Amino acid sequence: MLRAVLFDLDGTLIDSEKIYHRIEMEIASELGYDFFRPQDALDMRSLYRAASIELMAGRYGDAFDYDKYHDLMTTRFMAEASRCGIELKPGIDEVLGYLKDRGLIAAVVTATALERATKVMSDVGLAGRFDDVISAHEVKKGKPNPDPYLYACDKLGITPEEALCIEDSPNGVLSGVAAGIRTVMIPDLTEPDDELRGVLFDCVPSLADLPKVIDGILQ
């Protein structure tokens, strides 16, 4: 039985990851982090603070100040998002209409702080279009741990077996899978490797492909 579809936000519902990535590389350069690579930014997608600090400390020791980097990135992203706007991912209207017609819960489970996530969602016209918006900041350990999705299931009154998780990044996928939820990847900045494909329920090109996936579950 399927009762709810749980969506990541950045890179899944909104085309924001490419903006984050560009800003992160710019900030790293401005801070003099010549060692910082594009893959470092990709590896921190959806990764919660403590894990990000541990990851970067393991690679660069004390040379990388995560909090300074993250604060600058967040401030600059919000300013640019307000100034230039963020595009929705193709197929979002179709899939939300599909879920509503079938009486399925649609919720957002994001690594972004709740206040920032709801502000961005309001700016792009997504306010009120989901049954709930849940932030990984509400749990002790964020993605790729299962905590955000387990908390979301508990809050929505469903079991992990009754949910479908939609993610764009490896850390997000691992979070959904660890929670025992069928997880579909819609790749954004990176494609899944063979190991990640092995744990996915499905991998599709866009949100517009989800109704066919869900039809297969509901049959």
Image: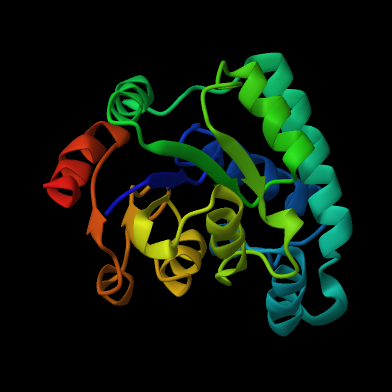
Relative image position of residue 132 (x, y in whole percent): 59, 37
The residue positioned farthest toward the front in the image shown: 157
Q: In this view, does 76 lie to the left or right of 186?
A: right
Q: Residue at x 74, y 78 (%)?
A: 54
Instruction: Depth check: give the residue in front, 182 or 30.
Output: 182
Q: Residue at x 21, y 36 (%)?
A: 211
Quarter of the rendering occupied by the N terminus: bottom left
Relative image position of residue 14 (x, y in whole percent): 50, 32
Relative image position of residue 146 (x, y in whole percent): 55, 70
Q: How many marks?
A: 0
Colour scheme employed for the rendering of this structure:
rainbow
Specify the quadrant of the image occupied by residue 102: top left
Q: Which residue is drawn at 55% across and 48% down?
A: 156
Please determine whether, in this image, residue 50 is positioned above or below residue 132: below
Instruction: Depth check: give the residue in front, 131 or 12.
Output: 131
Please determine whether, in this image, residue 16 is positioned above or below residue 150: above
Instruction: Depth check: give the residue in front, 101 or 85.
Output: 101
Q: Is residue 160 left or right of residue 205?
A: right
Relative image position of residue 218 (x, y in whole percent): 18, 46
Specify the quadrant of the image occupied by residue 38: bottom right
Q: In this view, does 36 lie to the left or right of 149?
A: right
Q: Which residue is drawn at 77% across and 61% down?
A: 33
Q: In this view, does 56 lie to the left or right of 97?
A: right
Please determine whether, in this image, residue 30 is positioned above or below residue 43: above
